[in-house]
Image (cartoon, helix red, strand yellow):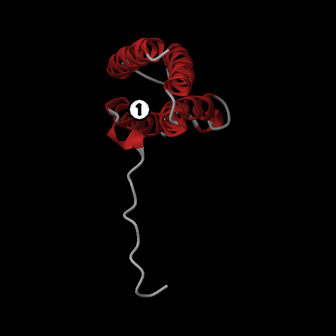
Amino acid sequence: MSGERKKPQQQPRHYDLEVWKDAMRMVREIYRTTAEFPEYERFGLISQMRRAAVSVPSNIAEGAARGGRTELVRFLTIARGSLAELDTQLWIARDLNFLGDVQPLQSALQLLTARLNALINANRSRAKGAR
């Protein structure tokens, strides 16, 4: 209604998480990389890699939105599983000669995994301390 003041919209929690930002960068890089794969892989490896990549920031966001540390840890752990899937898929793509040098992507993935592990461990410790 006109004349009413709208309450300022609060930014979602996951926007502040560096691990979510890193995961979003990884998604963009996976999309760029898989765009160069053979067309016949569109419904195979391309789809699997993109789905795994998208799952990472999606689960981070969902866990952050749930509010509690236990739920956050649960969804961060799911995101970590998706990273493991993506790691395996990168090796498969390399072995099938769809990728040349996987090292830059592997390094980014390892850094993201380490940051995710640190966030999981920190939140597990805080959740235990709150009991």
For residue 65, side relative to residue 29 (left or right): right
In the image shown, does 44 or 118 lie closer to the viewer?
Answer: 118
Query: Residue 106 at x, y = what percent?
Result: 38, 17
The image quadrant of residue 103 is top left
Query: Residue 117 at x, y = what percent?
Result: 41, 14
Kind of residue sitting beneath label 1: Ala
In the rendered view, tell whether residue 78 sits above or below residue 38. Answer: above
Give the mark count: 1
Query: Residue 20 at x, y = what percent?
Result: 39, 34
In the image shown, does 3 or 98 lie closer to the viewer?
Answer: 3
Which residue lies under the disc numbered 1?
Answer: 23
In the rendered view, tell whether residue 11 sits above or below residue 93. Answer: below
Callout 1: few (<14), some (14-19), or many (20+) C-alpha neighbours within 10 Å?
Answer: many
Query: Residue 40 at x, y = what percent?
Result: 65, 35
Q: Secondary structure at mark 1?
A: helix
Q: Residue shown at 41%/32% (left/top)? A: 23
Q: Residue shown at 37%/16% (left/top)? A: 122
The image quadrant of residue 47 is top right
